[in-house]
Image: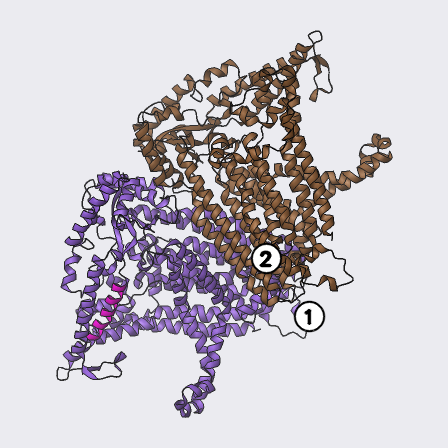
Chain colours: A purple, B brown
């Protein structure tokens, strides 16, 4: 194991590289030309004007004020200054609570570190075991860890006591944090101004009815069963194909703009392109004409598709967004069962419009159930067998394999440098590529599982990623061999042996994880703030595509906090901290630096950069809390395993109450706080309703909700939409005159034949216009 | 192992004893004097008059019509004749569905038995393994089991295929049964006439309010938050002490009646009793005077307690039964969260009045949470360590121990016969006593857990008993050693070894379980129908306590289906059937006889005897279903374990999808049907409301609900209640004039000071009168 000097050197190097990143960031962010990369949020908010307008030509691109460079770290205090309520106002509750996770790490680990260094380090240091073993190469780092205490020593009482103290402190901070977040969420919901999702319920699995269209069926059902509260509804059109066409046209538009710009700059020389895929082969044509004609074809297709969706009753999915007159009525409908068959007329709170995942709104119950089974099995294999296909790819991607498949590359490959690069890098690259696309795979799996909102998809992907990290990164680093081999050996070992096997290896891996924290944690965070990819992409776009100020706004990529991938990574640091708190406290300061540094960086990013795709009101906290509890229980079990190998089998039983109490604590917290994240109490709903009625007695809610839940392709956001569509846009999703006539005729037939729903006729007004 | 002849003999003996029981039953039930023991349900329904009136003196007691004796089994077809809808009408859905469990056993196991005997028995019989082993004592029973198939033989494909067929068939019958029961329940709920619990919600954890009493606080809260639906409410008085006093007085009343009867029969000689406990020691006094004076004292105490409850605001528990104007409003309130703090204002469907467990209505959330933790831990120790205290008692209860503690018994103990009885029986008796009181222990634990209805308590106790049976009866019979030793050895074995260890022993235990089924199952059921204890108790009461016809009615003890103890026992037979279906099919016919016999017997009992304490509408079915799934999964795992010892480790993996698919099937069924047992859909509620409004537009609901949820001690059922109380009874729980004045004064103060709830005053009428 490495000595303290080695670790100190490594830490110095990593700190230096982190500082290099920070310095580069400080330099780049001060250049006006990068302003839209490092402060996009302010542009999106409309607070910051373009710096390229007001100053001189040189000043437009380079910052010549040298005094600003001297204080290159002054973004740090600036990031910390904004008070939390303002931060919530500015960046949303999701982001504000997210950075609290880092703060929670500090709250949890700073006292634990102090205690561990005050109590456990002296106990370990004076253990004098390793010094007496001559044939073992040990360093002074090991002398700080539990390995230095002789087996069966009464010194372990210190460790046992401290694990209790750590557990209690962790639970206390978790409880306080859960409480604080729950209160923040409730306050946020109470303070929130009127939003469509407060009054809307997503209804899925509308059963087919031979006599009525989905539209009528939904209206009749809610008129009958929520007579005093039902206001209107919005059926869901299957616009997935249309959305694809729109996306295609957007891509084409980019190319068209690119060539137009090129032509404008060099008017002598009309740009050309090739007709094949990617413009690499095929016949050469005039680029502007080519893309213009392609655009026209697509626009026609799109118009036809729109027409089809509007007129085809099969394009209406068996789902609807039903709005109510009051929040009380909405809360009631969202939380109750509508029909004796629990697989139809499913109601749930509508996600906010931006948050809807439109593709998944119409999956029948049986299919959903089978999908979940299959994804669970697939996830299991992904976690435990992911090495198998990678090893297969690696075996293919050797020199002989490449020479066989692509013989013409032979002379290139046989060059010495190329050969060594291929042999050295290819196997690693296969793994790296897999790890990069892993979040996408997990997200796809969550999408297959059929969740209906982006926020839910993010939460489910995070859960999957968390388990992947636990098994493959944490256990995989501690025990050698692939996860599948581990699984097999675990199945063949007694359950009490598993914590022992893992527990024994833990102290030996301390230096490895310290290095991991520095490389992945410290440097990773510093890279995050530099935003290399968005920086390059922005400048490319700015050069080739931007014509107007609006285009420049479009070219910005503020990014967002990616909960699905970054939260499980934080959990990993929590796990490391909890596992090593009593085993090798030397690791703790590195964790603390990680949390502190991340806190500052992400606070800066949240304030200046990220633009969240949706706002769920910290809906994810119960997941964060539960996973922290899992980490805590893992650490307790491993501690039990470790101690039971130290000739302390009887004493280990004293640790048994820890996981039981932690598990109970989790259930207690869930009962106490979780509903604040999933339910909307009637009392709060009533208060908001009463307030609204008093302040805005003449509000036209129907008008307000009319366009709220329209598929984004029907919305006015597409800046280059053809005129034909714009006409409909002013009145989106209202059926054209033809369909409305059909519907009303149909409706009168239905109501005369179907006497079972007499109340439905009470609700007057054109049924199509919801 | 026993041969087929041995088993046949044993079966014959057991059948004979079962027939002896049945014959005794047939004789006894024909005697008019026993009519109230064997047909109490008809008396309670008022359909059957007392046979002792209409006939001659001799005919009153003994049936002299010899023809009736000839057809001594004719109760069987009679029991089967009543069609199911009539049975539901007559005995309630709970009972009707309960006997369907036995029918389900038949549906499940008759085809399985046919298949097993058609396919597996020939395959096993011709396996020719045991015949080739000379040193093993085997019988022809073993030749029918899987032991006769040589290890590694391709014959095991038959077993693997059959386990899939069995699993599919079991799941199919379970699915159909779940569906049928769900439909029966929904139909039952829909057809049900108006009942208080349809319109009432139980509200627990009403938070304390410094300005308002519980009564006012509940009213204001629901007036504000359910303004259109709230009708009235009933606070809960802490009448647990009063209930105890009433119970004491009832016991005294019995003694008084006994002595009065004695005196009436022998007027010359006034009966005496002794003042000590149980009347065994103390000074001798006149019995009638003694008990009369005691009764008076108690009556005074009772009156004081009543007075105290009525006047003391602390006697009002923070819980209430809140009634609504419509089923829709009730369904909404029961299924939604009221307050942002999910630990207060908890609402749930009110159990029907008979079903309420009054002691548990006011347990705060934190306490409840701790209670559940402690009971879970206690249950764990009860299941795994129950042998420890019993072994301790057994060690005390040996001869030396008794001689030491009670030296004066020495001469008695040293008699030879006494000695052998003590040595032979005492240890067994300690265990037997424990097993007899076990259901009571489990019920007490469930009560400590804080459930609020008797039906829920029964369900929770059944769950506990089920696990006790699985661990101690099933595993305990297969593996020697106490449960705790098993647990220890399991913890020290790899998880894959456990099914192996258990699986290997299974075929060897087939004859043991066959005997068990005959003794415990067949004979136990026959004993059930004989009702020895109620028979004796009734005749004792009839002789000593009964004066009037009403007393005789009281003396009847119809008993009831004890779900908490009998359902887990049925599950045990299901488990045996599923485990042995593919291993030793010889066991299956015994299971089928058990189910068929039980079905007839319990159908008879349900029709003629039992009087259920409550009606939950088959609310327990999800539990039954889930436990059957657990049995199925256990059988699958054990089959895997067994096969993996037969040199078929690779093939065993083919069985792995079974438990996964079964688990998934369980989740699917839960999603599909479970809500029918826990929720009341708004659509159904609306239909019932609309119907009621149309048929009874002038119904006074408030009057109807006024007395519904009054603690039973305040109800008019106590035939010997003193006059003072009777006055209040006509208007139960209305505060006496004094308190009502106090309340209204209080109310006006509160409403003037508390302006936060202005809507509350809308609801006029005396707030105390609900």
Give the position of the C terminus of chain B as an image quadrant: top left
* B55 and A470: which is toward the camera: B55
For the residues labelled 1 and 2, the Cα–Cα distance comes to: 50 Å
Dominant secondary-structure state across the stretch colored magenta: helix
* Letter of the chain that mark 1 sits on in the rendering: A
Left or right, residue B729 beside residue A261: right
Q: Position of residue A262 (x, y in %)?
A: 18, 79
Q: Quadrant of residue B582?
A: bottom right
B368 displayed left or right of B29:
left
Query: Which secondary structure, mark 1?
Result: helix
Specify start and end residues of the magenta stretch as a single range. Answer: A241-256
- Chain letter, disc 2 residue: B
- In this rendering, which labeled residue sits more in front, label 1 or label 2? 2
Identify the residue at image location x=51%, y=43%: B369
Residue identifier under label 2: B637
Instruction: Verify whether residue A251 appears in magenta.
Output: yes
- Would residue B500 be visible to someone looking at this image? no
Question: Could you classify mark 1 by the number of other residues whose Cα lies within 10 Å: few (under 14), some (14-19), or many (20 or more)?
Answer: few
> Looking at the picture, how far across and down is residue B185, in whole percent?
44, 39
Residue at x 86%, y 35% (from the top left corner): B416
The residue identified by callout 1 is A132
């Amino acid at each position: 194991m490495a000595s303290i000097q080695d670790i100190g050197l490594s830490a110095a190097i990593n700190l230096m590289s982190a500082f290099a990143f920070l310095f580069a960031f400080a330099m780049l962010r001060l250049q006006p030309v990068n302003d839209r990369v490092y402060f996009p949020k302010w542009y999106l908010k409309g607070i910051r004007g373009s710096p390229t307008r007001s100053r001189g030509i040189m000043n437009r691109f380079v910052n010549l004020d040298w005094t600003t460079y001297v204080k290159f770290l002054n973004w740090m205090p600036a990031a910390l200054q904004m008070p939390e309520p303002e931060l919530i106002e500015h960046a949303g509750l999701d982001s504000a609570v997210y950075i609290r996770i880092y703060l929670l790490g500090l709250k949890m680990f700073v006292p634990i570190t102090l205690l561990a260094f005050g109590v456990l380090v002296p106990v370990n240091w004076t253990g004098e075991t390793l010094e007496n073993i001559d044939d073992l190469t040990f360093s002074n780092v090991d002398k700080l860890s539990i390995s230095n205490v002789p087996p069966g020593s009464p010194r372990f009482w210190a460790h046992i006591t401290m694990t209790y103290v750590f557990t209690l402190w962790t639970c206390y901070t978790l409880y306080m944090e859960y409480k604080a977040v729950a209160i923040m969420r409730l306050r946020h919901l109470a303070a929130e101004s009127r939003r469509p999702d407060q009054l809307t319920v997503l209804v899925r699995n509308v059963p087919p009815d031979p006599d009525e269209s989905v539209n009528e069926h939904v209206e009749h059902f809610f008129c009958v069963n929520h007579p005093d509260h039902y206001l209107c509804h919005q059926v869901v059109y299957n616009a997935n194909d249309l959305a694809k066409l729109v996306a295609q046209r957007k891509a084409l538009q980019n190319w068209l703009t690119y060539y137009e710009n090129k032509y404008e700059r060099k008017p002598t020389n009309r740009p050309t392109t090739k007709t094949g895929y990617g413009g690499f082969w095929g016949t050469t044509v005039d680029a502007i004409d080519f893309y213009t004609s392609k655009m026209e074809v697509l626009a026609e297709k799109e118009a036809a598709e729109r027409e089809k969706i509007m007129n085809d009753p099969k394009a209406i999915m068996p789902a609807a967004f039903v709005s109510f007159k009051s929040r009380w009525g909405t809360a009631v409908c969202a939380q109750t069962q509508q029909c004796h068959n629990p697989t139809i007329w499913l109601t749930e709170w509508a996600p906010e419009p931006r948050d809807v995942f439109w593709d998944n709104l119409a999956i029948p119950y049986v299919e959903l159930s089978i999908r979940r089974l299959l994804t669970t099995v697939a996830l299991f294999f992904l976690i435990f067998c992911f090495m198998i296909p990678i090893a297969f790819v690696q075996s293919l991607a050797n020199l002989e394999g490449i020479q066989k498949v692509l013989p013409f590359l032979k002379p290139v490959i046989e060059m010495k440098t190329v050969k060594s690069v291929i042999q050295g890098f290819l196997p690693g690259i296969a793994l790296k590529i897999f790890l990069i696309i892993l979040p996408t795979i997990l997200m796809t799996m969550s999408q297959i599982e059929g969740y209906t909102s982006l926020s839910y998809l993010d939460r489910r992907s995070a859960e999957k990623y968390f388990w992947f990290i636990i098994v493959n990164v944490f256990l995989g680093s501690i025990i050698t061999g692939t996860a599948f081999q581990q699984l097999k050996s675990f199945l063949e070992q007694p359950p009490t042996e598993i914590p022992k096997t893992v527990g024994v290896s833990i102290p030996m891996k301390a230096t490895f994880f310290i290095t991991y924290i520095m490389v992945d944690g410290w440097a990773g965070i510093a890279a995050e703030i530099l935003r290399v990819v968005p920086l390059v992409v922005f400048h490319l776009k700015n050069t080739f595509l931007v014509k107007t100020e609006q285009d420049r706004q479009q070219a910005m990529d503020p990014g967002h906090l990616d909960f699905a991938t970054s939260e499980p990574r934080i959990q990993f640091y929590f796990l490391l901290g909890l596992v090593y708190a009593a085993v090798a406290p030397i690791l703790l300061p590195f964790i603390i630096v990680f949390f502190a540094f991340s806190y500052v960086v992400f606070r800066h990013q949240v304030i200046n950069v990220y633009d969240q795709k949706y706002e769920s009101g910290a809906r994810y906290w119960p997941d964060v809390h539960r996973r922290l509890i899992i980490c805590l229980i893992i650490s307790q079990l491993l501690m039990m395993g470790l101690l039971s190998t130290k000739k302390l089998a009887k004493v280990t039983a004293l640790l048994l109450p820890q996981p039981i109490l932690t598990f109970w604590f989790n259930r207690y917290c869930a009962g106490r706080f979780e509903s604040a994240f999933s339910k909307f109490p009637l009392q709060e709903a009533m208060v908001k309703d009463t307030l609204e009625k008093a302040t805005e007695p003449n509000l036209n809610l129907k008008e307000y909700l009319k366009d709220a839940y329209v598929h984004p392709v029907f919305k006015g956001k597409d800046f280059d939409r053809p005129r034909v569509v714009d006409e409909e846009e002013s009145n989106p999703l209202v059926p054209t005159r033809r369909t409305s006539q059909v519907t009303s005729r149909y409706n009168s037939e239905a109501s005369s034949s179907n006497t079972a729903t007499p109340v439905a006729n009470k609700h007057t007004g054109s049924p199509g216009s919801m």
